Amino acid sequence: MMDRRRFLTAAAFGGSAIGLSGCKILDGLSSIDHPLRNIMEAANGLTYRTQRLLGGDALAPEFTAADIRQGQKPNGSINPDDADYVDFGAGGFANWRLRVIGAVEAPQEYSLAQLQAMPARTQITRHDCVEGWSCIAKWTGVQLSRVLDAARPKAEARFVVFHCMDTIERSLSGLVKYYESIDMRDAVHPQTILAYGLNDAALPVANGAPLRVRVERQLGYKMAKYLHTIELVAGIEGFGDGNGSYWADRGYDWYAGI
Ligand SMILES: Nc1nc2c(c(=O)[nH]1)N[C@H]1C(S)=C(S)[C@@H](COP(=O)(O)O)O[C@H]1N2
Ligand SMILES: [Mo]
């Protein structure tokens, strides 16, 4: 299969119509994605649809321990002062639970120890922040697909919403908690993990303790930290300002493919 970046380059140079008309020229090829149309129009539909057209399951590059040059640079919220978070942290996260709810047959609740007892996946990957920096780090966690399987998603489940404990914004209109969402394709991707370990140690508070998601084929802001609930939904318009993520609500692409 053709490398995705090369395909995108070829697509971009293959016809000026693509460049001029945005992603419209691909519309006829992506009728299977029809229910997602509104989201894709609002997001960067070219990369989203191109990746799905190509199968959507390519792996992000993985590196070796020698490629880890520094600790994972913390960004965004790095020390939540939300009361529930502070309480969980003070207790070593023993009382913290991850809830799996929404369009599922069997809602679940996990302690950190229960997640750590599930089969683990470790991967050394590069984190690319939209601000322009990258870090290679070693992440350990449980594949999201295992957690979703246990909850038995209903047929209508199309997206996974990640609810976080940190207040990312305090404005006149109130407090805003960080949230994110991905589609089921990325959710069941083998490298999409719920990480509790970073560089062979427990995930630090600054990087999202006790649990954060890794979505290795997208930009850093998709990788929600400080998780407390995973919600399966048919549509993402019911959260925040309706764009599927804290940063998408502020103008960034919902689909942040790299
Ligand atoms: N809950 C939560 N998740 C978040 C953020 C945040 O502020 N709050 N920032 C995002 C951004 S922009 C980036 S680059 C990464 C940073 O992860 P790190 O602190 O482990 O480097 O987390 C993402 N996930
Ligand atoms: Mo970021």
Image: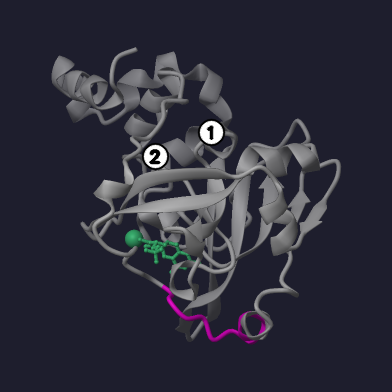
Left or right: where 233 falls relative to 255? right
Residue 189's disc is 1
**Residue 24: image location, x then y, percent:** 33, 25
Q: Eyeballing the image, is 120 above or below 26? A: below
Which residue sits at x=75%, y=75%?
A: 95
Q: How far from the left and from the top, in percent, is residue 241?
A: 52, 61
Residue 11 in the magenta stretch? The answer is: no
Q: Amino acid at mark 2?
A: Arg
Closer to the chain start, of discs 2 and 1, is 1
| Ligand 2 location (quadrant) | bottom left
**Residue type at tag 1:** His
Quadrant into which the C terminus falls? top left
Quarter assignment of residue 162: bottom right
Q: Is residue 167 left or right of residue 146?
A: left
Asked whether disc 2 touches disc 1, contact meaning CB atoms under 8 Å apart, the reply is yes
Res. 151 image quadrant: top right
Q: Which is the main secondary structure of the residues drawn in magenta?
A: loop
Q: Is residue 5 above or below residue 239?
A: above
Q: Which mark is residue 217?
A: 2
Question: Residue shown at 49%/74% (left/top)?
Answer: 205
The question of residue 78 being in magenta is answered with: yes
The boundaries of the magenta stretch are: 77-86
- Is there any visible trace of residue 244 in the rendered image? no
Q: Position of residue 106 (x, y in %)?
A: 86, 45
Q: Is mark 2 within 8 Å of ligand 1?
A: no
